Image (spheres, rainbow, N blue to C red):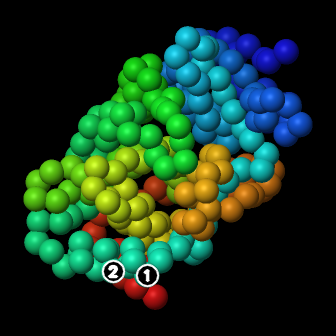
Amino acid sequence: MIYWLEPGAEFPDVSTACGRSTATPGLLAASRQLDTATLLRAYAGGIFPWFSANQPVLWWSPDPRTVLRTADFRMHRSFRKKLRLFRALAGCEVRIDTAFAEVIQSCAERPRPGQAGTWIGPQMQRAYIELHRAGYAHSVETWIDGQLVGGLYFVAMGCAVFGESMFSGNSGASRIALAALVGLCRHHDIELIDCQQDTPHLALLGARAMARSDFCRHIRAARQREAPLWEFRPVYWNHLDS
């Protein structure tokens, strides 16, 4: 039986999540609510929502957890060339939090590589837009000649960063946004970006498995640190040049 989370209740211990030998590894709880307070309690405990239409809100805490250590971010030769061109051209820029609703809508319409469909339904979009208004969800956006061509959104509590989804309407645009986030994180000594679940695409970028217990310890420490100013500065690119 999956734990049913009543409004305002605490989540069960993540050790009670379904094991890897089950059909739903990492499934911890279900609920009706998907509000800001519940989301913040979830992320603080290493838990995230992921559900489809006509399902209750399902809460997950897989073991192991897929994470991207910012020091391990991989940029292959072809992407380095694309990024250099992007940085050199007038009209190409990275912005943060100027089009959050558009980014999450685009993520819903264009699932990231390795995923057959989207879980970002209307309820999820409304919840994360509210989380953004509360200052805990952010977008990194790739713009070319005034057009939004790619981006991603993430949740942040202190220096704990939880990647959610990305989209690309232009070849490499989502990876440029991720590279910008990695550069920002390196500048502020943020060591880890949560990726939640493993995909071949994330593995190519350097994502690796991390024991859930280690991940939760990291989150407890990172969210106690003062959050950086979530804005992008061109100097952050320098952290990717080595």
Indicate the quadrant where residue 191 lies: bottom right
Kindly check if marks 2 and 1 are in contact, taking CB atoms under 8 A apart as contact.
yes
Left/right of residue 23 with respect to residue 204 in the rendered view: right
Badge 2: how crowded within 10 Å, few (<14), some, or many (20+)? Answer: few
Is residue 45 in view? no
Residue 210, given in percent of the width and then of the height, sits at: 75, 58
Residue furthest to the front in view is 116
Q: Is residue 178 above or below residue 223?
A: below
Q: Which residue sits at x=68%, y=18%?
A: 30
Closest to the observer: 221 or 25?
25
Closest to the observer: 150 or 189?
150
Badge 1: how crowded within 10 Å, few (<14), some, or many (20+)? Answer: few
Left/right of residue 200 with respect to residue 104 in the rendered view: right
Number of marks: 2
Q: Which residue sits at x=55%, y=48%?
A: 114
Rounded to the nearest angstrom, the CA distance separating label 2 from label 1 is 6 Å
Indicate the quadrant where residue 232 lies: bottom left
Residue 130, given in percent of the width and then of the height, sits at: 38, 28
Q: Which residue sits at x=57%, y=66%?
A: 204
Look at mark 2 in the image and give the residue it sits on.
Answer: 81
Q: Is residue 156 above or below residue 26?
A: below
Disc 2 residue type (three-letter): Lys
Residue 31, given in percent of the width and then of the height, sits at: 64, 15
Quadrant where the N terminus lies? top right
For residue 77, the mark is 1
Residue 135, given in percent of the width and then of the height, sits at: 38, 40
Is residue 21 in view? yes
Closest to the observer: 29 or 145?
145
Disc 1 residue type (three-letter): Arg
Element assignment for label 2? helix
